[in-house]
Amino acid sequence: MESVLPCDAVPGRALVTGVAGFIGSHVSDALLRRGTRVVGLDRLPPDRGSAATNLRSSLSHPSFDYVWADLRYDDLSTAVTGADVVFHLAGQPGVRPSWGEAFPEYLTCNVLATHRLMTECERQHVPRLVLASSSSVYGQIAADDRCREDAPARPVSPYGVTKLAAEQLCLAFAQRPAASTSVVALRYFTVYGPRQRADMLISTGHFAQRCTEPRCASSGTAAPAATSRTSTTWSPRPWPPRRLRRRQR
Ligand SMILES: NC(=O)c1ccc[n+]([C@@H]2O[C@H](COP(=O)([O-])OP(=O)(O)OC[C@H]3O[C@@H](n4cnc5c(N)ncnc54)[C@H](O)[C@@H]3O)[C@@H](O)[C@H]2O)c1
């Protein structure tokens, strides 16, 4: 276990994926307040719907650049260039829908997108990637029980399986000899606050309207799951196959 950036270090340049979402937009705002230059990437157009609302503050900041791209298909090299750290918050959230026909979306957005991003980080020797994982990797947690960080991962939903797969994928990269990108996975419990997703079970009336920044409703801690140095020698085949690739925006 080796720390690359001290806890109180302010990165000069950061890439935030999923920046148009609930947590990603707050991470971007917080980094900009600390003087970091932020490249924010999301598949949503920045001027419509919830993305426009979430990005209002970041988009008006001179140190913010928006990249409208899908991690599954688009070229990531420019977005990753120069990043001291990548906060990887893009993903397909939600437990219940993951049981249905939307599973391919979970698989591609949570696993394949992470694979492409991690590959590019390694290629460009990005020192650090912070992965948004989930308490769903633990599976069943008794209501009166505190969940230990080192409890075994036994996901009981397809969503949890994809989040655990993303963790393990990053860890596999990170354990390669002479690797350059270290990884930390944060297992968020239920995060709530302004801009939270409408589909979340915690209602805005009870919790979210009373805070100004996202908080974590948790019986345990959202702490680093894995940290290690990684390698640069592996060059996997690109995803998706050429016939599935979309035109670059
Ligand atoms: N909110 C929570 O309580 C919670 C709990 C545990 C884990 N998480 C994880 O934290 C992360 C952020 O969650 P959130 O609540 O902010 O979700 P969100 O839906 O508000 O934000 C996710 C963002 O990722 C983007 N995205 C998804 N797939 C993409 C792709 N292929 N390419 C580019 N952008 C893509 C979406 O457009 C969206 O803007 C997710 O990975 C989620 O699994 C959230």
Image (cartoon, rainbow, N blue to C red):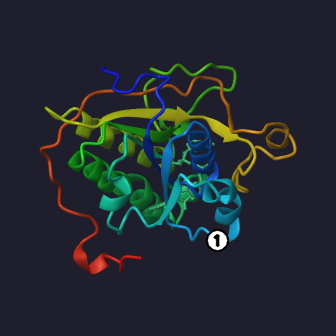
Measured as percent of width and height from the top left, residue 99 is found at 53, 57
Measured as percent of width and height from the top left, residue 127 is found at 31, 36
Which residue sits at x=50%, y=25%? 223
Residue 122 higher or lower than 65, as above or below = above
As rendered, which of 212 and 106 lies closer to the eye? 212
Q: Is residue 139 visible?
A: no
Measured as percent of width and height from the top left, residue 184 is found at 40, 32
In which quarter of the view is residue 70 placed?
Answer: bottom left
Which residue sits at x=57%, y=47%? 28
Quadrant for the C terminus in the image: bottom left
Please state if 172 lies on the left or on the right of 139 as rendered: left
In which quarter of the view is residue 79 placed?
Answer: bottom left
Which residue sits at x=39%, y=27%? 5
Measured as percent of width and height from the top left, residue 196 is found at 71, 50
Which residue sits at x=87%, y=45%? 205
Residue 105 higher or lower than 247, as above or below = above
Which amino acid type is marked by label 1?
Asp
Q: Which residue is mark 1?
A: 47
Residue 196 higher or lower than 2, as above or below = below
Name of the residue lying farthest toward the right: 205
Q: Is residue 225 visible?
A: yes
Quadrant for the N terminus in the image: top left
As rendered, which of 66 and 116 lies closer to the eye? 66
Name of the residue lying farthest toward the front: 62
As rendered, which of 124 and 109 lies closer to the eye? 124
Please state if 196 lies on the left or on the right of 7 as rendered: right
Please state if 194 lies on the left or on the right of 125 as rendered: right
> Mark 1 falls on what kind of element?
loop
The number of discs equals: 1
